[in-house]
Amino acid sequence: MLTLSPILLATLAAVVLVAAAPVRPLAAQDTPAAGAVAGDLVVPPLPQDGGPKDLLEFVTKTLAQPVPPAPREATMKLFRDRAGLAYEASDKVLGMVKTDDESYEPAVRMKMQSLMMLAQLGDPLAPKRLGEFAATLIDSPSKPLAREARRMTIITDMQAMFTTRDVAGAGAIVERIEALVKEDPADPNSANLAMQTAGALEQFPGGEALSMQIYRRIGPLLAASDNERTKAISDMFAGILRRLDLPGHAMEITGTNMDGTPFDQKQLDGKVVLVDFWATWCGPCVAEMPNVLEQYAKYHDKGFEVVGVSLDNDRAALEAFIAENKLPWIILHEQQTAKGGHPLAAKYGITGIPTVILIGRDGKVVTMDARGEKLGEQLDLLFKDPR
């Protein structure tokens, strides 16, 4: 399934580690090799002189340099070396300053962020170091810093839980996230952590009920905030709950046909319907098309219909794809607004595609797991005694 929106924020980078080549664990005294290159960009060594502010500024400027085109391996090495530079600098600064120094909090944040990036890039020691370091900060007199540290400890605990594939401790993690959101419902970082944790649990065996807890308990807290970003996440939670509650219930389908006319759901009365959220740029969606075409040809005359809900931005590309592949079914598409997306996708909290929903003749959802061979199996059952 392809993620639709850029919601994998850095706050969850350590929960589901990105596949990358293993790297040598960083020791506190390690310095990225001078002359490390990705394309034409060199990561310089950390200056051995200068005060805390100078070191932080040096790293900030280094990290801000653009990344030139380069092979993936060289680019990943550049990112690892940059993260290692930030880790070394922040560790050095924290050894030079006290908690009331103006460089203290920037150094703390840089250390957490560098460890998080190293964890994301495959450093096997970084998640443990991140958790241990964050645990020392959860009682910080700085409320924002303490809250960020608490988020980091949740992230590392989640990573450990997914590594062991044991969700026994997930209930306590949900309660910790809820406490964070209650403390400041307008904090988008905590809201995003809740969203990403719920999404991860929803896909994890045994975690579905816990994800529902997050959607039900934390969604109303976010809705009451005055922050647009957290309210948007609350709206997404409501949509996801609406979607997850569909099996056994009717689904309202609205939208605009390709010819610009409003879609009328009454034309589906008495039919078996596959609602397919898709896009031309989605590889898995396109790969599924031959299977849907085959089932459509087999069962359309018996009362099978497909409603494709296109999430394409490029109308011309969509029209060309439909013509080239001779898609015979209903396609709904909306011109993009400032918020983007399709209203029906927003209504049902569609966060990744392809998402398919199979509806029976009575208008009630049969299953949301009808791709590949399962689509044919479901249709065989539904049309076993066709009317």
Image (spheres, grey):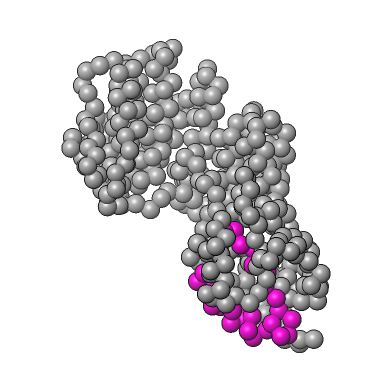
- Residue 122 visible in image: yes
Q: Residue 60 in the image: state x and y as whole percent.
A: 35, 27
Which corner quadrant of the image does residue 224 belong to? top right
Does the magenta portion include 292?
A: yes
Which corner quadrant of the image does residue 89 belong to? top left
* Residue drawn at 48 percent across, 65 percent down: 283
* Residue drawn at 66 percent across, 77 percent down: 378
In the image, is residue 274 above or below residue 73?
below
Relative depth, front residue between 277 and 320? 320
User: Residue most toward the left?
Assistant: 35
* Residue drawn at 37 percent across, 34 percent down: 114
Q: Quadrant of the C terminus?
A: bottom right
Relative depth, front residue between 298 and 127? 298
Q: Residue 227 in the image: state x and y as whole percent.
A: 65, 32
- Residue 178 visible in image: no
> In the displayed structure, does residue 232 sit left or right of residue 270?
left
* Residue drawn at 68 percent across, 42 percent down: 234
Q: Residue 100 in the image: state x and y as whole percent.
A: 44, 12
Relative depth, front residue between 170 and 386? 386
In the image, is residue 114 above or below residue 364?
above
What stretch of residues is rendered in magenta?
286-312
Q: Residue 66 in the image: state x and y as whole percent.
A: 33, 38
Report how many numbered discs are placed on residues in the image.
Answer: 0
> In the displayed structure, does residue 43 sit left or right of residue 312?
left
| SS majority, magenta | helix
Does the magenta portion include 47?
A: no
Relative depth, front residue between 43 and 142? 43
